[in-house]
Image: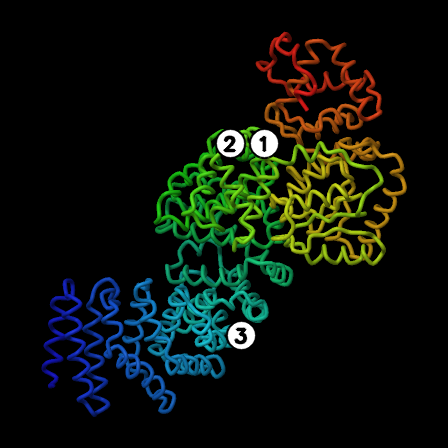
Amino acid sequence: MSNTAVDEHCKSIQKHAANISIEQLKTSFDVFTVGFKEIDIPDTKSALIEKILVTLANLPHRNKILLNSELVKHEFFIILRDNAIIHELHRKQAEESVTQKFVLDATILFMNLSYNIDDSNVDELKSLLFSKPLIDELVYCLQEIGTNGKYLNDSQLLRSVRSLLTIFKNIINNHMTAYDYSLIAPIFSAVTQCLCSPYAIGMIKSLDQHFYQKLDNSQTLFLHTMPRYLQWYPDYGDPENLIKILRTLLHEFTAWTTSCQPDSYLQCSSQVNAMIRQLTYFLIRPVESENINIFSEEFYSDYCKLVLQWSSFLSSALKHHSNIANLKSKVQTIVQVLYNFTLHLNVLNFMKTIPDLISMLLKLTETDHDEIQLNAYRCLGKIMVENNIKAMANPGKIATVYIDFIRNTIDDPGKTERFDSLLKSLKNFVQHDQVKTELIKQGILPLLMKCVVEVRFDPIKVRQVALEILLALSFFNEACLILKQNEDFMNHSRSLAENANSDHAGLQRAAEGLLWKLEKENEAVAKPSILYSHKYNIMISYAHKNQELCLQIHQELVKHGFNVWLDRECLHGSTMIGIANAIENSENVLICMSNAYKESVYCQSEAHYAFERGCRLIPIIVEADYKPDGWLGIIVSGKIYVNFANTEFGLAYEKLKNEIIQQHQTDSNPLPTNSTENDSMSLEHAELLSNTIEDLPYSITEWTHDHVKLFLLRMELGATILPLCTRLDGDRLLQLYEMCLSNRESMYQSLKFELNERYHTLLPIADYLTFLHEIKVYIPSNTIKSPSSFFRLTMCDLM
């Protein structure tokens, strides 16, 4: 077959590129294959390949039509792979010749194919490109680049290597097997070698000290393509490999980033912005697992410098918002990067100290860009504490935005990823009581129940997360009532909780935890305890992220003869029934306080139950600079903390041990079940209480069980009024107050009798009058009902 036939088919493809059929292309491929096989002269073969590649580049939509299975399996593609890429890369190593342009054209063609991978063609594309000779040649090129700096001036080759890495990155994200990973493992090692080389450091040092420069091919390969490839590989989470890269690059990258003026970031090109985004993502968000603390501790100083610089970028963006083209893409990058920093707990604590960061993020919640608004709320959910929510944010607006986003994405298949991310970030906000109240008022519960009931939702990303959010909301009686009244939801939850053979242990645990809260907790709280019959001296309640330190504490306690209960699995271990049993049978409960502990609904359930049972709580700090607030601040108010995070371990442990021993020796006559601890009424604890308590909600109707306890402890009524109100929220406490108003003397006698009968404690008239006087400031003027409506209520109705 003559070259004339090949030329005619090339012209036909160029002419009919927009409407060409698969059959026409298959016929052309047949002609190209025969034409290539008839040629013996290497240069002529190269010219033919180049001509065909130029022709195929005219096909629209990134050559998507070529991904038809009949075409991908065609022999012509194998010819292109073997002769245009493998052969030429091998020849270059031997002859050190200039890279032919058709090598780049061929890799770009295959890269465009990889952008359109789906279930119908992934196997054919892997069969074509997961070729050991191709992988070997790519690995050799990378090794030469990383070891000797070879080819760094060969732009055609560098661009070809970038295309090949992109191809493998795109395929890695689609149905990989263990064998597939074993084939490409050498690529991962070679890329790691490059990023740990002096040449990678040189790429950062060669950057100008501003952001509006243009990157060359070697800088783009090292600082964008390579990190982007590694993050998609499963061994990306291997701490040993990552620490090696971080130790090589992070300090230099931090020095360069902080040397640039913040305003210049707003002028950077899309190419530089993509590089900064990718490299920053790679260096500051290496893993989302228990290994994350490894990175936080060693690289804390650089992370803090970087987060300050990114905060400066945000400040500049907000000042110049009307004058910068493509500003939204810059702001989107900024807020994504800031969120990534919040994944490091000690960096998160540092971020809480940055002036104006919260106010700047709040401004972003007003933007009309969905991604920016969502990521701003994700950051705020991590950074804000209870006082920030009260003083600076509108809880109603936060709830409205989240509910609107959920309604707009819950049934849209094209927004699945956004919906999943939205639910995950909402978990951060439901640790705040003000936001919980607004979410319930504005109708979040039916949406979350839908996520649990409908099996079309992802069991881990959606159904489990929805159950955990509902568990957090169930600390409010209104939410409990709505959930329990939905029979379909309750049946589905029971089914999930009883599915012991489920592959999704986290989903089962979430269902069990919620059902415990809805159906069993009140009964368990009311169950009497037997004094001096504790099975354990100590029960340790902790978050999985703090496991290492907590296990060390456990080991020391056991060594010194204490009988200690600890759930070693923690994340997927004991059910709430088992944990509740451990709490009931423990003399002391260690509350291991950290951001992770406060954010965990399971930890909240444990701490809340121990508090409800009147257990002796010993709070210890296991995260540097952590200060408890919100529900956790309420539970540990008035107690002395043992700080393991900012104190040498031996000294902190001795203090803890002495506290346990002292409590055991002095607690010879403890209050019976459901009473508060005697020591909560000491002068020392009262002083601590006044220093640590946050303001209560202004209206008693917004109070939770914990707010009621907080109020009574604050008024030094913990030994008298509190035992009578252990399970009252604000609404029920208001009813009790109204009953007292209806007949002060008879209610005093009733309360006095019950306190003496159940707890063998007297109720001083001064405590009763103090209660009636101090609570008035929290009573809305329009809520007091006629006294006659309460005559038939008894204390049993309230308890």
Residue 308 in sight: no
In space, the residues marked 3 and 2 are separated at their CA atoms by: 51 Å
Of labels 3 and 2, the one closer to you: 2
Label at residue 735? none
Which secondary structure, mark 3? loop
Q: Label 3 belongs to which residue?
A: 196
| Numbered disc 2: secondary structure | helix
Residue 58 percent location from the top left of the image:
19, 68
Q: CA distance from mark 2 to mark 1?
A: 9 Å
Instruction: Please rate how many residues cluster around mark 3, counting C-alpha atoms within 10 Å: few if below 14, some from 14 to 19, many from 20.
Output: many
Q: Which residue is mark 2?
A: 440
CA gap between label 1 and label 3 equals 52 Å
Foreground mark, 1 or 3? 1
Residue 466 vertical position relative to residue 758 in the rendered view, above or below = below
| Residue where numbered disc 1 is placed | 476
Q: Amino acid at mark 3?
A: Cys
Give the residue drawn at x 42%, y 50%: 332
- Tell whether 20 sits left or right of 452: left
Tell me, yes or no, whether the two marked residues, 2 and 1, touch with CB atoms within 8 Å.
yes
